[in-house]
Amino acid sequence: MENPLRGLPAPPPLGAAALPPGTYAGQVVLVTGGGTGLGKAIAAEFARLGADVVIAGRHAGRLDAACAELAAVAGAGRVAAAVCDIRDPERVSDVFDAAEAAFGPPDVLVNNAAANFPCPAEDLSPNAWRAVVDITLTGTWFMTREFGRRHLAAGTPGSIVNIGASYAWTGGPGFAHSAAAKAGVKNLVETLAVEWGPYGIQINGLVPGLFPHADMSEDIRGGLDRGAPDAKDGRQPALRVGEPRELGWAATFLASPYARFVTGHTLVVDGANWQRRSLVNPEVVPVRAQLGRGPFAP
């Protein structure tokens, strides 16, 4: 008998566009963490639609390589890079100045930069906690604040997309630092949509599911492999993982003229994986055991 489980269909091919050509012509899009991974994939979709794209990150070499890739797919727009540590508010101001000098004031901000690694909560050092929260939450706030203040001063509309995580709702065992930070990022979306909506600034969240890519950290990739290296697709209700371009299409929609009445919303793009439940819960395996760590020793 033929297997009736087919999963969700594959997306259109790489290079296809979800919006009309030139949707972002004449607009400037600033993407943090745009030199690698999902940030680069998001930047590519804005570039395909004609945006002038500025990618920001801490590593000049990665940014330069990404610029070359993005220039090859750009519709009619241009691509530039700005080295920036978003934990430093002065550097944040500098990156907006650099974007404005290159192409003009950013019309769209994508807060993609984040830090993460799995760790039992009791093993998290103060520095480890700060490293993740300072980049993921505080850095996102610094970027958002600078974007908002500049648009408020100029009296111009703008759009912000914050990259979130589903454990902002559910909690994230093994990721207490990141889950707490992402919950804050989600709350910023909901709070600022109300505060800044009257001034023409919209803000939405975008939550990726499992989107394997070459720049995944060894910690995260190792966790997937420990779970069952040959069964990643079978662990998703969609029976497949996401393609990075699918996240890019969602981001370009949320920031586009076609979503102007969508604000304060967080869109989850994960094939319903975060809503998956079993009829009978599996046996509880403590986080320490899942990570292969021995008993806690203070």
Image (cartoon, rainbow, N blue to C red):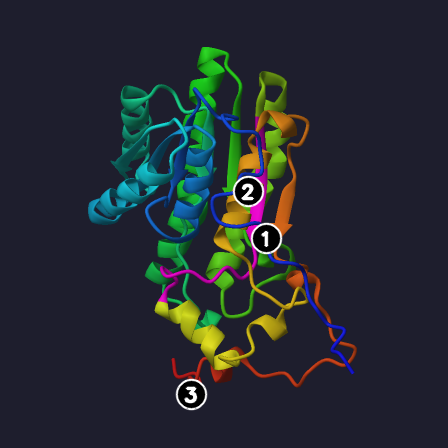
Q: Helix, strand, or loop for circle 2?
A: helix
| Of pointers 3 and 2, the one earlier in the residue sequence | 2
Q: Which residue is mark 1?
A: 11
Q: Which residue is mark 3?
A: 294
Q: Residue at x 27, y 20 (%)?
A: 101
Asked if residue 203 is positioned above or below residue 153 in the image, the reply reads below
Q: Foreground mark, 1 or 2?
A: 1
Residue 249: which numbered mark, if any? Answer: 2
Q: Residue 207 magenta-drawn?
A: yes
The type of residue carrying mark 2 is Trp
The quadrant the N terminus occupies is bottom right
Crowd tier of the residue under label 3, counting other residues whose Cα lies within 10 Å: few below 14, some 14–19, many 20 or above: few
Q: Residue at x 50, y 63 (%)?
A: 176
Q: Is residue 31 left or right of residue 283?
A: left
The type of residue carrying mark 1 is Pro
Q: Helix, strand, or loop for circle 3?
A: loop
Q: Residue at x 27, y 36 (%)?
A: 81
Crowd tier of the residue under label 1, counting other residues whose Cα lies within 10 Å: few below 14, some 14–19, many 20 or above: few
In depth, the one of 142 and 57 nearer the eye is 57
> Start and end of the magenta stretch?
202-217
